[in-house]
Image (cartoon, rainbow, N blue to C red):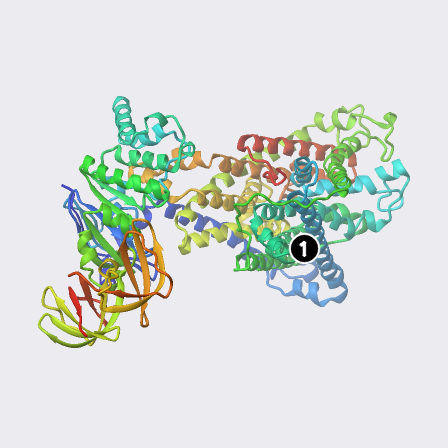
Amino acid sequence: MPQIILEHIHKRFDKFVAVEDLNLVIEDRGFVTLLGPSGCGKTTTLRMIAGLETPTSGRILIDGVPVYDSDRGINLPPNKRDIGFLFQNYALWPHMTVYQNIAFGLEMLKWDRKRIESRVGEMLQLLKIEQFGKRYPAELSGGQQQRVAIARTLAPSPRVLFMDEPLSNLDAKLRGEMRTELKRLHSDTNSTFVYVTHDQLEAMTLSTRVCLMETGRLQQYAPPLEIYNQPANIFVASFVGNPTMNFIPVRILSREGNRIRMEMLGRQAVFTAQAPAEDLSSEGVLGVRPEFLPIREDGALTASIYSTLPAGMETTVKASCGETMLTSVVFGSVDYAVDTQVKMEITGNSIVLFDGQTSRQAGVGAVEILD
Amino acid sequence: MSTIQRDLRREPLRYRMKAFFAKPANLILLFFLIALVVLSLMPMVTMLTNMFTVHAGTEKKMLRVPVGSWTLNHFELLFADPEWSRSNFWTPLLNSLIVATGSGILGILIGGTVAWFITRSDLKCKKFISAVFVFPYMMPAWTLALFWTNMFQNSKVGGGVTGMVESLFGICMPEWFVFGLFPMIMVIGLHYSPFAYLLIGGILKNMDATLEESATILKASRFTIIRRVTIPIVMPAILSTFLLIFSSGFASYTVPVFLGSATRTFTLSTKMRALIQAGYEGQGYIMAFLSILLGTAILGINQYFTGKRKSFTTVSGKSGQVSLVKLRGANGIISAVLIVLTLFFAIMPLVSFALESVIKQAGNYSFSNMTLDFWIGTESSVFETGMPSGILMNGTMWWGLLRQVGLAVTVSLIVGTCGMLIGYACVRRRGTWLARAVENLAFFPYLMPAMAFGTIYLAVATSASFKWMYGSFFLLGLVASVKFLPFASRSGVNSMMQIAPEIEEAATIFGVPWVTRMSRILFPIQKSAIISGYLLPVINVMREVALFTLLVPYPRYLLTTMLFSFNETGYAQYGSAVTLLIIVIIILINSLVNKLTGASFDKGIGG
């Protein structure tokens, strides 16, 4: 079964380091997302696993077979790695019809004509594009081209499927539909998917594990909810979640076991960690998701409304509390006049405390504001 | 020490070599690096040494030292002797600069004005004007020069041959109008004005109209918009067009030969040839070297203009709704004038060549004075013509044509293939020093004026170890291939840039071998660009004179050099007939290009 292992992968372009010491295990039949801002090395990583790019050093194993090993000089070409690759711009061959596009790879595998015909038919049906077989790519809409690209990639039944931002060229509505289709396709085809995206929502909704990268370094590799609730550092916390997490600077006053006394927004508060907190410097940052900062009449914090953004199902409220701008998400539609004074509360057991110096997570727990 | 450095050290060179040669693009680049260093840098070195050595013939006699010994005499003569220096260097240089500057300005004025009318006003018959206006650009520049003399020469100037204007209207144009710098500027400027039109028009057409519209909304007047928005945006393009015309005008050899010989008005390139033919090879090579330096400098300046952040040429607009300037009452007059002028310069040369090739006595256009003898005459009917029979009945002409066509086909096959491969390899390995080196080396011959380039290869072919090359078909093919490679490799790079690398990678993943990827994916996609990459060198070779004139074994070896020998020896009818023949061939090839690629010269600017 295809398990993909990356060991100490480095990639440099001249002096620019694209990927640095990356270690990753992609489980069989997983749906792993490489997530990060543009230029973080996620596409390079994907292309290195696929064999389109050669790492500077390290080792890659697919299914126990080393496909790249800088020590032993192994570097298998992409076609020997039994993979499929879906490109961001689809890379459909403009001079071939839909049918020819899908059949071409199978011809190269020396399949006989009958078998190719039935396989292409099968693919056209799977992706609901039977009626387009004779058309040229230019005569199809973006969504249809996307389906043809998927059909072409899936036709030789690769055991691993790589996708490089496949949905970013589609409009918002189509993107939503294709997301559903991809998740369905993952369970139908029974293969391993590795997926590159910069859209955190896509990563959250699709994958079994998210690999979050920044400037060539792995930041956190965990299931989506773990990334959301227990971010490893401030970068991860700020990259995932929309609206962005609130980051409130705090000063650590004292600590007794799991209880940490601190000063925040000019008030005294106590943070109670779920597990024993890690070592902390005197400066910290408290990470509060907008949904854990409701507006309540009995709230302990006072803030003044800066702006209100109702979206129908929920409303994003921006309010300033002293110097700090806070974001809160309220269920349903509400509208506050600008500069209204409101009360806010920090609720729940998923408040994250970061070390102010290292930006690393120091603990997850609840906050109680003292008076 | 970081892990990267440790790991790199562990990676043996052998594996890195293997990885390097596993990419076909690397192999291609390496091959062309070596080939181009040999073919364009080495001749340069030969030429440099020739600037300091003594040649057989005049130089040997004058200096009384063995051939091949080192000397600075060429420099002394060319620069130190005031009289010699003035007539053989400074005056020709000044003339070249005047012609280059004048034709640059004229070309931009004409081309830019037409471009503005076509893209920004509601002129009538735009499509027609646009198509006819670019027509003369296809024809070699010297046809226009020849046409000019056919029209305006008269009994009072030059050889005293009566031209069309004199015989029809009885007007004798003054000498400065017929021969010398003025007609050179006119002809080169007119010839390159379609080039300016294509470049400036293309930018005006693609320029985002919202840029001008937003100025309109801010209450700027039409004139202010042109002055403050339009012109600054197209300025880099105008400058770069000017420089390209300037360098073409500077390098032009054929036009000054036709329009300057009668009054002995020399430019640098005609003087270069005259000196070499008179046995002053060393000085000729010095001039060639100087014109290469100038060409390089101009290209450097051009890159500075187009490569800087003030280059707006890539502005691409969505908005196609340009509000066209209403010409109102002037519309009819302006379009009529443009139609007449463009038709005159497109059609009249053909008519004039046809007429000149059938009249016995120059200037007399009556039927009784006409004969087809110059075309199909046989030994008995042809009198003092320098040829035993009319050109269509004559072996010399057919051989010349055959050789020229053979040369064109050979060169096109070589240049087209090399250009495509260079384009592919440079785009795939973009950013590596190897790709940069090959791209620049392939472009290097562009910097050299054709005359100077021919001179370089003459230096090689007359050197001891390459004597066998002199005057051979092989040498002509080699020179033309290197000289026309810049265009082919540029268009190769451009066409390959349009194919996303993923298109090829998608096939790589299926295990498609390189040759199949090229033949079944990349070539079919860029079919039309590749076909035109093969056909354009054909046109280039068919109309080239300056490059071959020093290298042919005898003047009537090729059709174009034959034409020149006719003209120098005064057989104007044969000259006109051969010119007409060349134009017809070029038009045929060009319409073939258009038919096969579906692209026309003016790329729908007038549409």
Q: Is residue B350 left or right of residue B240?
A: right
Q: Is residue B366 left or right of residue B218?
A: right
Q: Is residue A115 left or right of residue B337?
A: left
Q: Residue furthest right?
A: B170
Q: Residue furthest top?
A: A114
Depicted A314 relative to depicted A251: above or below:
above
Q: Residue at x 72, y 37 (%)?
A: B346
Q: Is residue B403 visible to us here?
A: no
Depicted B524 relative to depicted A236: above or below:
above
* Marked residue chain, label 1: B
Q: Where residue A303 sits in the image (x, y, percent)?
A: 30, 68
Q: Is residue B415 visible to us here?
A: yes
Q: Where residue A327 sits in the image (x, y, percent)?
A: 30, 61
Q: Amino acid at mark 1?
A: Ser
Closer to the camera in the image, B81 or B512: B512
Q: In which quadrant will I find the N terminus of chain A?
A: top left
Q: Quadrant of residue B306?
A: bottom right
SS category of the residue bearing label 1: loop
Q: Quadrant of residue A244?
A: bottom left
How many marks are shown on the rendered structure?
Answer: 1
Residue where numbered disc 1 is placed? B221
Q: In which quadrant will I find the C terminus of chain A?
A: bottom left
Depicted B168 relative to depicted A43: above or below:
above
Q: Where residue B355 sits in the image (x, y, percent)?
A: 79, 31
Q: Where residue B393 sits in the image (x, y, percent)?
A: 71, 25
